[in-house]
Amino acid sequence: MNHDRQDHHFVGADRLMRASGAPLCDPCRHLTLAEAEANAEFDWSKATDCRVLLKRHQATAECSAPEPE
């Protein structure tokens, strides 16, 4: 059962990465994958940190990925 939950989180990250239709920049890709790994390890605090850092990064001019709708 644990394995199924881990697979679900990685599939969710892959879906998120392709949702915009545009490629993610390296920091976005890194943070998205780090969040998926944290979720798979049930490390909710780390997953939350990754989401916050991703939002902050996407708010900067440094991010080349389109902002989520």
Image (tube, grey):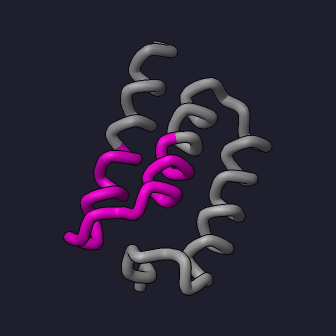
Is 9 placed left or right of 35 in the picture? Answer: left
Q: Can you name the residue that lies furthest to the front here?
A: 62
From the viewer's side, name the closer residue of 64 and 40: 64
From the viewer's side, name the closer residue of 56 and 2: 56
Estimate the x, y position of residue 12 in percent, counting from the top left.
Answer: 38, 46
Is 51 placed left or right of 1 in the picture? Answer: right
Is 11 placed left or right of 69 in the picture? Answer: left
Q: Is residue 47 above or below residue 16?
A: above
The region drawn magenta spans 12-33
The residue drawn where x is 63% and y is 24% is: 41
Q: Can you name the residue that lies furthest to the left here?
A: 21
From the viewer's side, name the closer residue of 43 and 4: 43
From the viewer's side, name the closer residue of 2 and 16: 16
Estimate the x, y position of residue 21 in percent, counting from the top left.
Answer: 20, 70
Please identify the quarter of the rendering in which residue 8 is found. Answer: top left
Estimate the x, y position of residue 25 in percent, counting from the top left.
Answer: 40, 63
Is 41 placed left or right of 48 in the picture? Answer: left
The residue drawn where x is 64% and y is 59% is: 51
Is residue 36 covered in magenta? Answer: no
Q: Is residue 42 above or below residue 29?
A: above
The residue drawn where x is 55% and y is 86% is: 61
Q: Is residue 31 above or below residue 66?
A: above
| Location of the C terminus (image quadrant) | bottom left
State the count of labels.
Answer: 0
Is residue 30 covered in magenta? Answer: yes
Q: Main secondary structure of the magenta part?
A: helix
The residue drawn where x is 74% and y is 53% is: 49
Estimate the x, y position of residue 64 in percent, counting from the top left.
Answer: 41, 76
Please identify the quarter of the rendering in which residue 45 is found. Answer: top right
Please identify the quarter of the rendering in which residue 7 is found. Answer: top left
